[in-house]
Image (cartoon, helix red, strand yellow):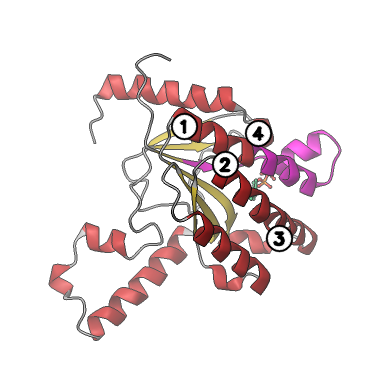
Amino acid sequence: MEDRIIPAHVAIIMDGNGRWAKKRGLPRKMGHVEGCKVVEQTVEDAARLGIRYLTVYAFSTENWKRSGDEVDALMQLFRYYAKRLLKIANENNVRVKMIGERSRFAPDIIDKIHALEKTTEKNTGMTFVIAVNYGSRDEICRGVRRMLADSRDGILEPECVTQETISSYLDTAGLPDPDLLIRTSGEERLSNFLLWQLAYSELYFSDVLWPDFKKEELVKAIEVYNKRERRFGNAK
Ligand code: FPP
């Protein structure tokens, strides 16, 4: 992979935890346990490869509809990994940021999210963005509500609204749009993830289930991205 272009921002829809567990006769939550280990490793791999921004879809606005047991297991994993990620982020000079509507989480999880962002805010390496209780349409709704409130208060003139203005009202304000989106497990949908931000991104679909997604898979996705870059000359 010499002379490769490393995409500045890689976004990942981590899919296939449930199928990974089912294939092994394990409860679904074991797929998420394994999936978290892969998240941890991917943060280190991405930082070392020189990726500047890594965004992962950890919990969607639709995920609340899963069984109480599975939602509880995911919440317990967030609690545990908030602590572990703090260590990993600081060891790798990684800044952590959460996007999504966090007020629906238990107070201790909200505190942990806040601590994770605050403690890592001065790190200067990769930015690791975790989408929790995130849905693109919900993000756009929340952004439009704030825009209308600012317009009512005289802070925003409707005729001055540009694409950049809209971007600045989204949860991802200040982050560049993803260059590459990876979705695992053979599904080829966006599932309400970063709909505005992915307008020009390269899409890469892998058949590998998320718990099996290793560094080689990330490198493979970057290689395919490089081939497309060469073919189309990065034309938007
Ligand atoms: C999709 O697999 C995965 C999820 C809904 C959750 C992803 C979350 C993690 C890997 C944990 C992230 C944790 C941190 C700390 C960032 P699925 O359950 O939809 O799989 P299936 O399609 O095979 O059923």
Earlier sequence position, callout 3 versus callout 2: 3
Q: Which residue, given by chain and number where applicable, does mark 2 sit on?
A: 91
Q: Give the structural element (helix, strand or loop) at label 4.
A: loop
Earlier sequence position, callout 2 versus callout 4: 2
Relative to 198, residue 226 above or below: above
Q: Nearer the viewer, mark 3 or mark 4?
A: 3
Query: Label 3 neighbourhood size at 10 Å, few (<14), some (14-19), many (20+)?
Result: some
Q: Give the structural element (helix, strand or loop) at label 2.
A: helix
Residue found 37% across the figure and 46% down from its top: 198
Earlier sequence position, callout 3 versus callout 1: 3
Residue 147 horizontal side relative to residue 22, left or right: left
Instruction: Indicate the amino acid at tag 1.
Output: Tyr
The span shown in magenta is 11-38
Residue 129 horizontal side relative to residue 34, left or right: left
Residue found 63% across the figure and 59% down from its top: 63
Disc 3 from disc 2: Cα separation: 24 Å
Disc 3 from disc 1: Cα separation: 29 Å
Q: Which residue, given by chain and number where applicable, does mark 1 sit on?
A: 204
Does mark 4's beta carbon lie closer than 8 Å to ligand 1?
yes
Instruction: Based on the picture, tell me whether residue 170 belongs to the magenta stretch.
Output: no
Between 189 and 86, which is closer to the camera in this rendering? 86
Please say whether residue 40 is visible from this viewpoint. Answer: yes
Query: Label 2 neighbourhood size at 10 Å, few (<14), some (14-19), many (20+)?
Result: few
Residue 150 horizontal side relative to residue 41, left or right: left
Q: Which residue, given by chain and number where applicable, does mark 3 sit on?
A: 75
Q: Give the structural element (helix, strand or loop) at label 1.
A: strand
Image quadrant assignment for residue 150 = bottom left
Query: Label 1 neighbourhood size at 10 Å, few (<14), some (14-19), many (20+)?
Result: some
Q: Quadrant of the N terminus?
A: top left
Query: Label 4 neighbourhood size at 10 Å, few (<14), some (14-19), many (20+)?
Result: many
Residue 232 horizontal side relative to residue 127, left or right: left
Q: Which residue, given by chain and number where applicable, does mark 4 sit on?
A: 209
